[in-house]
Amino acid sequence: MDEPRLDDFSDEALDAVLAAGDEALLDHVRAHADPTQTLAALLAEPGDLASDRGAVGVSPSSVAHRPKRQIRDRVQAWGFYHEIADICDLAAVFNWVSNIHDADHLARAVRLLCVRALDLDHVVESAPQGAHGRAIKVLRLLRRSLDHAAAHARDLVLALGPVRTDKYLRLPHLSGELTEDLGRALAHAHAFARLFLRSMEIDASGLDLTDVRLPDRDRDMVLTRVVWDVDTRWPADVHAWLQVRSEEIEPGVFRLRGGTERDPHESAGV
Amino acid sequence: MRRPVPAGAGRGREPEAGTAATRQEFLDFLDAEYAYVVRFVMRTGASLADAEDAAQHMAVQGWRKVLRGQWNREALPRPSAWARRVALNHHRAEHRDQGAISIGPDADRPAPGPGHAELTGQARDLVALLRVLDPECRMVIAFDLDDIPSADIARELGITQQQVRDRRAKARRLLKARLASVTDREGRPGRG
């Protein structure tokens, strides 16, 4: 084949290619980047005054006092941790002689995690006072680890393709890198979830929570330090579950007791 | 692709240092520029997460200038170029240990680096295309795509305007060669 000649591609054509790619890149950034996190981080900077928040019209915790949403966010943060744990389990049984179908399945699952991690942006807004900046940082580390995992998973699929002659040299390395990336992501997801589960009390007194889906797994973590009363409405199974695990902190007001069942004879009488 | 610098971005009236007006002015600037700064850093090879990290660092530095009364025309005459330089420097410092980008065995078809798995279509092609450039050339092209004047590029990168022109010419030559090569192989239209 003849060598390409540079004058084959004009300046105008080059500019057109760059412009088109650049527009698409901007669309991607606008779809996935979130400047509100940055604004929130600024407001947490030393030297900022509480009164400034009104002046700039941004309040990073403006939605942080909605108990129902806080509980939902806890469910989401903890659920995301378990999603990563499931992928880690999948990667653990993957070995370098696996077929491309398994690798492709793994790569798709990791890519899905990358997308799902974008949903955690709004969860950050529910971070407790004083933990907002840390939540942003941990989430960024989590996404970075997932990005790296997705890249390694994709490389794994490519390495298993029929055209690669060095696959058996690359596969153990790529598998190892992927496992490390996922391990880091799991640690960050755990730190992220714990940031929301342990740090503040949520007052669910009088709320109707019958439409909040509370999975069996880690229910005690999600409801840690949630205060409820006789007027709080729970899904039926959760109500029964709470009755044997709550303590009455004042007449008609209850709080989950560290996830352990209490004596049924002393159960909350609601 | 190209866009004007937002009016009043560090150029308007000179409010008292650290006043609500200055802060609002900076936040308006940040709101207008944030996505563009993230894209700028991504052009140099960063993932979205890393680029956002760099943009946030830039924002914090700018905010500190606001609080110190340095967000004004005299102290910061070219805020758009400044924002890109600060973000880029942060990204480079954070990833210094990764060294130069290796094109790898598939040199004819460079792929986007880690963190670009979610990119698709033309965005992915752009990031892959720019990876054929060395970091110095890539930075000049990244500034060019935001319409930053050569004099400002030279100032922010600490090089002469002639060096900017040389790197630009080299970069464009390499990019055209790459595109011509791909076009030859894939038979795509697009030649001038």
Image (cartoon, coloured by chain):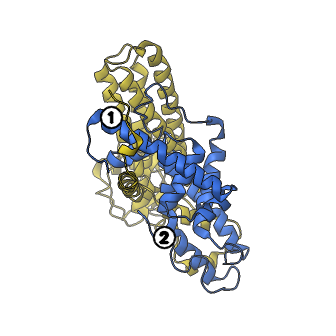
In the image, what residue occupies the spot 65% across and 74% down?
B77
In the image, what residue occupies the spot 49% across and 62% down?
B146
Chain that is blue in the image: B
- Provide residue A153's location: percent of width, then percent of height: 41, 30
Position of the N terminus of chain B by quadrant? bottom left
Chain for numbered disc 2: B
Instruction: State the residue position of label 1.
Output: A108
- Number of dots carrying numbers: 2
Is B34 placed left or right of B188 in the picture? Answer: right
Instruction: Give the CA distance from mark 2 to mark 1.
Output: 34 Å
Q: Colour of chain A?
A: yellow
Quarter of the view holding residue A217: top left
Is A184 placed left or right of A17 in the picture? Answer: right
- Whether discs 2 and 1 lie on one chain: the answer is no
Q: Is residue A4 above or below residue B27?
A: above
Instruction: State the residue position of label 2.
Output: B32
Q: Secondary structure at mark 2?
A: helix
Chain for numbered disc 1: A
Q: Is residue B187 above or below residue A127?
A: above
Question: Which numbered marker is on residue A155?
Answer: none
Q: Nearer the viewer, residue A262 or A165?
A: A165
